[in-house]
Amino acid sequence: MSTASNLRALLAGDDFLMMPCCFDGLSATLIERAGYPLTFMSGFSVSAARLGMPDTGLISYGEMVDQGRSICQATALPVIGDGDTGYGNALNVKRTVQGYAQAGFAGIMIEDQLSPKRCGHTKGKQTVGFDEACMRIQAAVDARNEGADILIMARTDARQTEGLDEAIRRMKAFEKIGADILFLEAPQSVDEMTFFCQEVKGAKMANMVEQGKTPVLPPMQLAEMGYKIAAYPLTLILSAVQAMETALEELKGGYHPKSLASFEHLQEVIGFPDYYQNEERYKI
């Protein structure tokens, strides 16, 4: 089965899906080793890790698809990729969807922000009009239907720019167009999250951003509301930043950091034992 087929099977199953988000091959590998069923390539985290820059539309299609190719090669999990606004008009959206499918992604997220887009939980967001938003999702669905083996996650940021009613209107339209997963970004209360799940059909994703605009709720509560997926876009990179800053401060203070993984464990995680086994096979 392709990774897209695996993702379809997960969506069709009964289990609620917890989805920690990755930003490179190592983080994707750790998510797989921890036993999660899928992951998402977070645009915020990739921009931070690859460029050391904010998620404000500064990273390009080429950089994102290149990072995604490395991630998809590092894990057998279905990976959903952040496709931002599709990087242009409807034809750019189609090319983006096709390129992500070729890179190995199981799914791609396309959103309705005005370019340059930005993280959904930061200041300054703007969204395109309803018709253009629908056109983007239609182009993505067309690319899928024309042969790209990939699922479409449709996202709206209209809650912040135009209100909850318009966000729900867009979600319903995206579902009707044929999106596989629906993502209303940044609802601001439990009531809004519940209303979204009651009003909109299809598989829905909750975005659990620490210190963001949306309440971070337990998985069981999200499942009871009607969500299918809980994404954790910043959890791993926040953990990594905290651990690295602590280690750097300890080194600067003259102490060797104590809370480190062992060198042996790191070698195991990144595949040294398999490499050595294969090396022995091809020795002359």
Image (cartoon, rainbow, N blue to C red):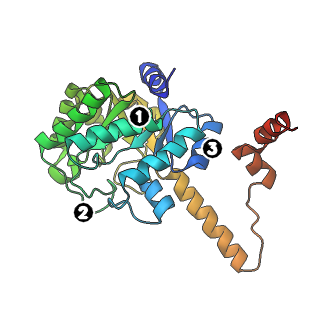
Answer whether labels 3 and 2 touch (C-beta < 8 Å).
no
Which mark, by number, is residue 124?
A: 2
77 sits left or right of 195 in the view: right
The tag earlier along the polypeptide, 3 or 1, is: 3
245 sits left or right of 138 in the view: right
Q: Position of residue 210 (x, y in %)?
A: 45, 54
Frontmost residue, 213 versus 42: 42
Q: Position of residue 200 (x, y in %)?
A: 24, 29
Quick one: label 3, few (<14), some, or many (20+) residues within 10 Å? Answer: some
Q: Position of residue 48 (x, y in %)?
A: 47, 61
| Amino acid identity at mark 1 | Ala
| Image point (23%, 34%), residue name | 139
The tag earlier along the polypeptide, 1 or 2, is: 1
Q: Identify the image quadrant of the C terminus.
A: top right
- Determine whether 54 is above or below 78 in the image: below
| Amino acid identity at mark 2 | Gly
Which mark, by number, is residue 42?
A: none
Indicate the quadrant where residue 281 lies.
top right
| Image point (61%, 48%), residue name | 26
